Image (cartoon, rainbow, N blue to C red):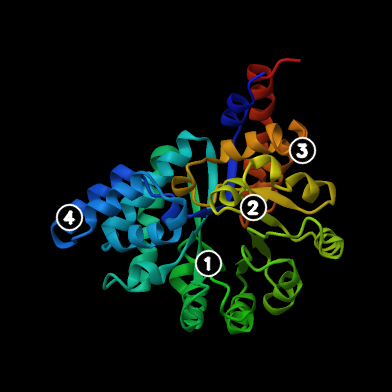
């Protein structure tokens, strides 16, 4: 039996892929050279080497540096196209990609309309040429609540509506800012009819219920420390709130020393609607297939459990119903073929 070959063969959906953690090295470094950064930046060689060989202690700095090198619409289109090609080769049929516009716009003169159009230029080319579909979650950085209302306005504007923006997000590991500062932005998104996503990665279990009350998100990502809190698990199971997690993130950020210590099985056994995603695959040095394999081989889930998680990712995506049905039909057909091809009795 080859789990890796099996998971590589089935169609997949990634609901938490972060743009700055998914850049392709060769394309990003080519963009940097074209923009003259090696000559202009004293520490270019240092960061270029670090991006190829990531340091777990500097993941967020690396992501910020990567964003600072991408300065023009054609740069945005190129990195998105490269990501789309990688998704297609990995049989990821659809991805919802977290994008923080302020990370890019502070280093360029792009307007938000130009920025969104550039995202979709790369997306459309990858879809036409490779069949990989992508949508955007425009994110407010957790350490900069001042841009919250702007991002909410961008995410609900006319360009976003026609430009594959499906949600407003809150992202970042910095928890210093009170959640109440983002409440108005999330309320604006709900009022305008788009989804909301909140990353609650480092908050701790005690703050999670207040996050749900303050922000009323449609989805949570990277929730940590809830596996031994029965009241929170019961609340999440009852509400059906999707929780999108990455085992690799927990490893790289020092939350667990080994994948077997990740409490994925506890979440599944308590009927929490947990899903697996890649997060920042380039900087975590992992993939969605790695997440699925670790779930079975090291976290103690049955193969059928992980197949259910993969299928549920399609069901709980922000796609419209007709596109979900198309992906689900494709998944079910190719699942049986992958079973026969890669799994023995």
Q: Visible in this render: residue 151?
A: yes
| Label 2 – label 1 distance at C-alpha | 14 Å
Residue 172: mark in rendering: 1
Residue 245: mark in rendering: 2
Judged left or right of residue 316, residue 240 is: right
Judged left or right of residue 154, residue 76 is: left
Could you tell me residue 6's position as x and y percent?
Answer: 62, 26
CB atoms of marks 4 and 1 within 8 Å: no
| Label 2 – label 3 distance at C-alpha | 15 Å
Placement of 179 over or under 313, stated as above or below: below
Q: Visible in this render: residue 19?
A: no
- Quarter location, residue 335: top right
Task: Determine the residue positioned at 49% across, 71% down.
Answer: 141
Placement of 297 over or under 239, stated as above or below: above
Badge 3 is on which residue? Answer: 305
Badge 4 is on which residue? Answer: 38
| Label 4 – label 3 distance at C-alpha | 48 Å
Q: Residues within 10 Å of mark 1 (few under 14, many from 20)?
A: some
Question: Which SS class for mark 4?
Answer: helix
Which mark is nearer the camera, 2 or 3? 2
Task: Determine the residue positioned at 54% across, 66% down.
Answer: 173
Which mark is nearer the camera, 1 or 3? 1
Q: Earlier in the sequence, mark 1 or mark 3?
A: 1
Task: Determine the residue positioned at 28% across, 59% down.
Answer: 69
Q: Earlier in the sequence, mark 4 or mark 1?
A: 4
Could you tell me residue 103's position as x and y percent?
Answer: 38, 68
């Amino acid at each position: 039996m080859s789990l890796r070959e099996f998971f590589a063969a089935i169609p997949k959906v990634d609901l938490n892929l972060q743009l700055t953690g998914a850049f392709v090295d060769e394309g990003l470094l080519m963009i940097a050279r074209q923009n003259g950064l090696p000559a202009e930046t004293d520490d270019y060689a240092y960061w270029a080497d670090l991006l190829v060989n990531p340091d777990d202690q500097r993941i967020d700095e690396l992501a910020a540096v990567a964003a600072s090198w991408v300065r023009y619409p054609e740069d945005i289109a190129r990195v998105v196209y490269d990501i789309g090609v990688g998704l297609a080769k990995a049989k990821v049929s659809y991805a919802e990609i977290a994008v923080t516009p302020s990370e890019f716009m502070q280093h360029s003169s792009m307007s938000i309309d130009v920025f969104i159009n550039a995202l979709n230029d790369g997306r459309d080319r990858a879809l036409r040429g490779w069949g990989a579909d992508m949508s955007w979650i425009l994110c407010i950085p957790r350490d900069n609540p001042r841009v919250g209302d702007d991002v909410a306005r961008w995410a609900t504007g006319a360009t976003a509506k026609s430009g594959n923006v499906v949600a407003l997000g809150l992202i970042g590991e910095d928890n210093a800012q009170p959640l109440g500062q983002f409440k108005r932005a999330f309320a604006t998104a709900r009022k305008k009819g788009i989804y909301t996503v909140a990353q609650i990665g480092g908050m701790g279990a005690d703050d999670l219920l207040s996050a749900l009350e303050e922000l009323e998100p449609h989805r949570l990502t990277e929730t940590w420390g809830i596996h031994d809190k029965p009241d929170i698990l019961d609340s999440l199971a009852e509400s059906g709130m999707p929780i999108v997690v990455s085992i690799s993130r927990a490893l790289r950020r020092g939350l667990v020393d080994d994948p077997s210590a990740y409490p994925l099985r506890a979440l599944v056994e308590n009927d929490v609607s947990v899903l697996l995603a890649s997060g920042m695959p380039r900087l975590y040095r992992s993939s969605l297939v790695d997440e699925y394999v670790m779930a079975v081989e090291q976290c103690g889930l049955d193969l059928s459990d992980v197949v259910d998680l993969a299928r549920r990712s399609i069901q709980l995506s922000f796609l419209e119903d007709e596109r979900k049905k198309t992906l689900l039909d494709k998944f079910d057909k190719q699942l049986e073929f992958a079973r026969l091809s890669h799994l023995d009795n």
